[in-house]
């Protein structure tokens, strides 16, 4: 199999993996039961007078904020996969200088991805329920799940991002979603 076909196959499988992971994480019940959940996570099972449990036929609902974070990650990963695909095509078709340039850009994309994932993990470990970090042209956008952000929280996020992603604090944009 040629390198181009292998690359395309790998990118297709990675994209499929991301889509299936998002589906599994947000659209399946982790206990494997048919419990229906309300938006606040409360169980909708009802018990009758005999102590029997009756289950309502409905689906597990996903909060809008869950959907935002999942779709933001998916969009970021799709854009990165598309850019990688273009760079791999340049490697397959290009000359010496083009191959080196495309390889450097692929390395930069992979490094950006690992830094984003690391910062997301650090933000979750510092107490935020969820976070999405997106680096683009030396600027970093951070969206965290919070009902409100205090100035101290914003400063801490900017410090974490600038320290781990090697960008200045002025290049970091912080926002939140409940």
Image (cartoon, rainbow, N blue to C red):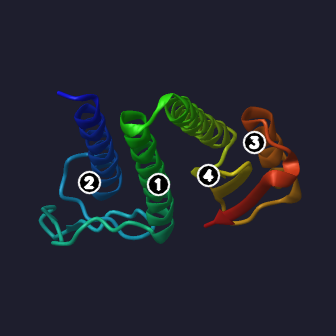
Compared with 81, 75 (above or below) is: below
Q: CA distance from mark 4 to mark 1?
A: 11 Å
Residue name at image x 83 percent, y 59 percent: 150
Q: Earlier in the sequence, mark 4 or mark 2?
A: 2
Q: Could you tell me residue 162's position as x and y percent?
A: 80, 40
Contact check, label 3 and label 4, Cβ < 8 Å: no
Residue 28, which numbered label? Answer: 2
Q: Could you tell me residue 104's position as x and y percent?
A: 58, 31
Residue 134, which numbered label? Answer: 4
Residue 79, which numbered label? Answer: 1
Residue name at image x 39 percent, y 64 percent: 42
Compared with 62, 114 (above or below) is: above
Q: CA distance from mark 2 to mark 3?
A: 32 Å
Tag nearer the camera, 4 or 2: 4
User: For mark 1, does the 10 Å Cα neighbourhood hold few (<14), some (14 to 19), or many (20 or more) residues?
Assistant: few
SS for dot 4: strand
């Amino acid at each position: 199999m040629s390198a181009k076909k292998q690359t395309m196959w790998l990118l297709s499988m990675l994209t499929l993996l991301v889509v299936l992971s998002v589906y599994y994480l947000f659209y399946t019940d982790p206990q494997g039961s048919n419990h229906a959940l309300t938006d606040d996570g409360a169980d909708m099972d009802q018990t009758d007078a005999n102590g029997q449990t009756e289950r309502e036929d409905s689906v597990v609902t996903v909060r809008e904020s869950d959907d935002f974070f999942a779709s933001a990650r998916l969009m970021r990963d799709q854009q990165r996969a598309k850019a990688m695909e273009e760079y791999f095509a340049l490697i397959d078709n290009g000359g010496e200088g083009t191959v080196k340039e495309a390889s450097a850009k692929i390395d930069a994309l992979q490094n950006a991805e690992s830094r984003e994932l690391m910062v997301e993990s650090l933000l979750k470990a510092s107490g935020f329920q969820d976070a999405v970090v997106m680096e683009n042209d030396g600027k970093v956008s951070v969206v965290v799940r919070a009902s409100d952000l205090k100035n101290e929280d914003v400063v801490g996020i900017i410090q974490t991002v600038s320290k781990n992603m090697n960008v200045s604090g002025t290049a970091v944009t912080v926002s939140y979603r409940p």
